[in-house]
Image (cartoon, coloured by chain):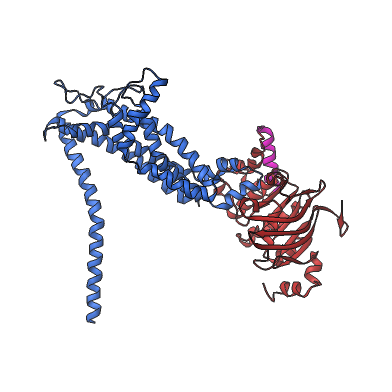
Amino acid sequence: MKRKLSSKIKERVVEGILLLSALSSILITLSIVFILFYEALGFFKDVSLGEFLTGRQWTPLFAQPKFGILPLVSGTLLVTGIAVLVALPVGLIVAVYLSEYAPHKVREIAKPILELLAAVPTVVYGYFALLFLTPILQNFIPQLSGFNALSPGIIMGVMIIPYVSSVSEDAMKAVPMHIREGSYATGATKFQTAFKVVIPSAFSGIAAAFIIGISRAIGETMVVAIAAGMMPNLTLNPIEPIQTLTAYIVGVSLGDVPHGTIEYKTIFAAGITLFFMTLFLNILGFWFRKRIREVY
Amino acid sequence: MSTVFSENLKAEVKNLSFFYNQVQALKHVNLPIAENRITALIGPSGCGKTTYLRCFNRMHDLYPGNRYEGEILLYPDQLNIVSSEVDPIEVRMRISMVFQKPNPFPKTVYENVAYGLRVRGERRKRLLDEKVEKALKQAALWDEVRDRIHDLAFNLSGGQQQRLCIARALATDPEILLFDEPTSALDPTATLKIEELIMQLKKDVTIIIVTHNMQQAARVSDYTAFMYLGEIIEFDKTEKIFTHPSKKLTEDYITGRFG
């Protein structure tokens, strides 16, 4: 009886500790969101939401400050768009190769190497874009400025290839062999089987992979902070310098902005914009992931 | 063209052996396949009947380390199906297969049936429509799906999905149709429908069926081969196998003493 009681208490304690650690991560997330909203609210006391969402200039540090978020949003979307144009097709092709074509040995070697791409510090990618890729691109595009959206966009694309390919490959690998056999049995080639049957079968997973990749691109900071130019610029021209939401946050945080000023609050206004952009994508990704399980 | 039981032959297996890496799964088997007849392969689990069937459309080529020896001659042109010089895709263009579990693609009913034709580069809408309708009629599915051929195939029932897979296999006018335990995942009513269908189909195509179910072999097939441990123990007309088998082992199996 005594033993039973003590072991029961032990159970309770362990359960309590587990619950606490689970709660702590939720609590931290919630408090981040709370602080983000709270400080952003302070910002919107000084600047109207209309001006924030429609203003075409972002110059919070000028004597005559302007608080239109559009230049930062366009910068973010532009770099993300370029990164996605690189990462999605290449990532998908890599995934098809690894899942459908590569012999076992090649896959065992190629996969870890590919995943190493994700392990390179982003600061290295940033300087790689600025000091290596931009000069090369300038040989082909003489008007390309030293800081621009194109070069960090491409590099970011390369950076997120492993995210896209790894999740896409998992989705393709999960397609049951008897579905592939059904295709081969009609006389289909490997290529036809991969593109007409395996990819459609793995569609939800591949879509989720794409969204993970896009989310990564939107949230990426270092590469753009280093190589894109720190210049809020309402443009979709990839050869001009721009600034993204993340690069702005990093730039202002690095300077000595006094706590509580409007400049300080702009960080949170940019942050909350970023928050909603990635939240939207995460919900979309979650929805696609849920659909994967419905098919088989 | 050679004959057995005075039937025209569509194919003939001669001294075929098959290896999974070092393991020999088929041991010097021989078998005549009569044209427009149903040949059943029966035997206990692991006897090699599915392995045998999958030699006919070179399915084993999808996995590394597999090896064939001997011949499967496809008539009338005497193409040796299992020769390494013959492209497996060429073989699969002429010999179709229906699998144990229905395996429709994540496409519409129409696109599932049209798949084999599209793979062959067919683009003429009119011809595709005709062939899809014909195949669905042959597979006794047309009346049930005519109003929803543009719905996803997953919305069909298990039995309908299997008939859809049969339609997919028929759409390309195969010379031989292979069935690998086609009813093992289906309920009795759906099974009966598929069996009736298989018997209907033999006027159009030569059929080889692997089945675990002896009654099924007895009901549908014209010829039966009894396999055991990678060898063909006995091959004969189905009624002979099930009434007067000439080998003791066959008799033990069909009377349920093992297997």
> Relative to residue A106, is residue B216 drawn left or right?
right
Residue at figure coordinates x 31%, y 24% from the top left: A147
Q: Quadrant of the C terminus of chain B?
A: bottom right
Residue B124 among magenta residues? yes
Residue interval drawn in magenta = B123-138
Is residue B149 visible to us here? no
Q: Is residue A44 above or below residue A28?
A: above
Q: Is residue A170 above or below residue B4?
A: above
Colour displayed for chain B in the image of the structure: red
Q: Quadrant of residue B25?
A: bottom right
The extreme bottom residue here reads: A1
Is residue A139 visible to us here? yes
Residue A69 among magenta residues? no
> Relative to residue A206, is residue A267 drawn left or right?
left
Q: Quadrant of residue A285?
A: top left
Position of residue A13 measured from the top left corner of the image (x, y, whole percent): 22, 67
Position of residue A103 measured from the top left corner of the image (x, y, whole percent): 55, 48
Residue at figure coordinates x 25%, y 78% from the top left: A4
> Relative to residue A259, is residue A186 drawn left or right?
right
Q: Quadrant of residue A270?
A: top left
| Residue situated in front as seen by the camera: A19 or A154 | A154
Position of residue B163 measured from the top left corner of the image (x, y, whole percent): 65, 51
Q: Main secondary structure of the magenta part?
A: helix
Q: Is residue A61 above or below residue A204?
A: above
The extreme right residue here reads: B6
